Each structure stands twice: as structure tokens, then as C-alpha cells.
Image (cartoon, grey):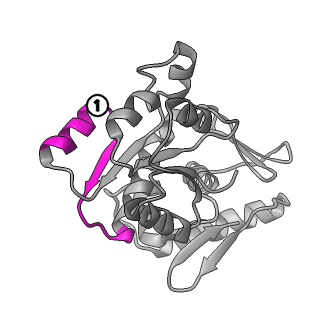
Amino acid sequence: MGAPKILVIGSDNDLGRKAIYALEAEYFDVRSMGKTFEEKDLLEEIMRTNPPALVVEGSGQFSRVVPTLKGQNSSKKAGRTRSFLPLIVVSSSLSSTESAAALDAGADDVISGVFEATEFVSRVKALLRRVAPDNASEVIEYKNIALDPRRHLAFVDGRPMKLALTEFRLLQFFMTHPDFVYGREHLLDVVWGQDRYLDERTVNTYISRLSRKLKGMSADAQFMSVRGVGYQFL
């Protein structure tokens, strides 16, 4: 499992290029389409063996894109496959009425006007986190590690690994967000929750404990400390 795949529509205009640069700087796996396309081209792109995790619409044609992504004008089979696919609409000049129309049509987020790359990427990550529970019942695999969230089981090369609840949640987060660097404060928020009374040293303790267990099981993946930033799972 690599970095999340993001499809950017409108890669041949300034807004689309800005979105691509921002995402690639954060090591997302970016695919792109120009602003001129047929519905069948978009369907082929999102129905591949490895479909995108999220679509960024920057071509100014959300009224065409939303029905295709949400399965409103295609076969039932394709619609079921795409119904969960999240969409962010970015535009330099959407009015409040147009933004509301995009959301009402099925867009999951709208960014209108001049936006900073950091805010854009943060909203992409936030949306990916919100849709993650849709896959909570699936077995998650990364290198030689496998997690079964439904049964709360962890395996390395098929051998069971005993994990405490918080260790399991921490490993699950990193296995679904590999290759990215996350700060300790962010990890506290997503793993322990914002309503907690813990400091950042708690993250260090759990990362160290989890690292020892993974090493003891001969796992191929490991945590890397990025000085002054946080942790990365490779």
C-alpha cells in the first residue's frame, strides 16, 4: 500500500497545476486529466484496478463531474463502486450560491478563491480521514504486516502479534497513511482524540513500544523519527 492516489481534473490550467504541485510536494500519488474530457474517459480513470482515493475538480465543470463520480448517470454496478469516492471542488471564482450548489450536488468540500497550499493539503488529508471508516472492515496490508480492524487482529508474515488497543490504532493509522511525516500533536488528535490530557511524550513512548514489537516480529516496516517534525512509517 503506497501513498493515496489523487486524481486532479483540470491539470492544464493554473488552478489544477497549483493543486498538483501542492499534492506532489506531500508525496501523494497524483494522476491528472485536462479540463476537456468525455464522461467515458473519467469513468475509465476511476474504474481502474487501483482507483483514486479522492478527486480534485479544478476544471470548473463540477456539474459534469459530480454525477459521474456519484453514480447518478451510469450503471448500478459502477455507481456502487464509486458512491464513496470523495470530491473536492477548487475554483478561483465560485460565488457562495455556486459553492452551495456544488455541495448540494454531492461535492464533499469546496475551496473558492486564492488558497494556500498548506490549507489545501490539510483539507485533503482531513477528507481522507473522514472517509477512512468506509474501509474499516477490510483487512489492511502494508509490506509483511496485516491488520484486521473488525476482529482487532494483527499479523506479521501470517503470525499473530499481540497489541494493546492504542498500539493497534496507532499502527492502523500509519499503515493507512504510509510515507508521510506526522507531528506528535496531530497523532495525539487522530489516535487518542482531541479530548485528552496527554503530552507529546506519550507518542514517543507508544512509538518506541510499537517499534520494539515490530522489530521482534521481523516486520519489514519501521518508524523513522524526523527531527523537529514527527514520525514517518516506511
Mark yes or no: residue 88 visible: yes
Q: Residue at x 81, y 51 (%)?
A: 144
Circle 1 sits in a helix, a strand or a loop, which is it?
helix
Residue 114 covered by magenta stretch: yes
Percent across and percent down for residue 56 are 43, 49
Quarter where residue 167 is shown: bottom right
Q: Residue furthest bottom?
A: 227
Residue 192 covered by magenta stretch: no
Q: Residue furthest top?
A: 76
Residue annotated with mark 1: 105
Query: In front here: 157 or 204?
Result: 157
Mark yes or no: residue 136 visible: no
Query: In front here: 139 or 81?
Result: 81
Quarter where residue 219 is shown: bottom right
Give above or below for 43 relative to 180: above
Quarter where residue 171 is shown: bottom right
Which segment did they paint magenta?
97-118
Percent across and percent down for residue 142 are 73, 51
Horizontally, residue 103 falls left or right of residue 150, namely: left
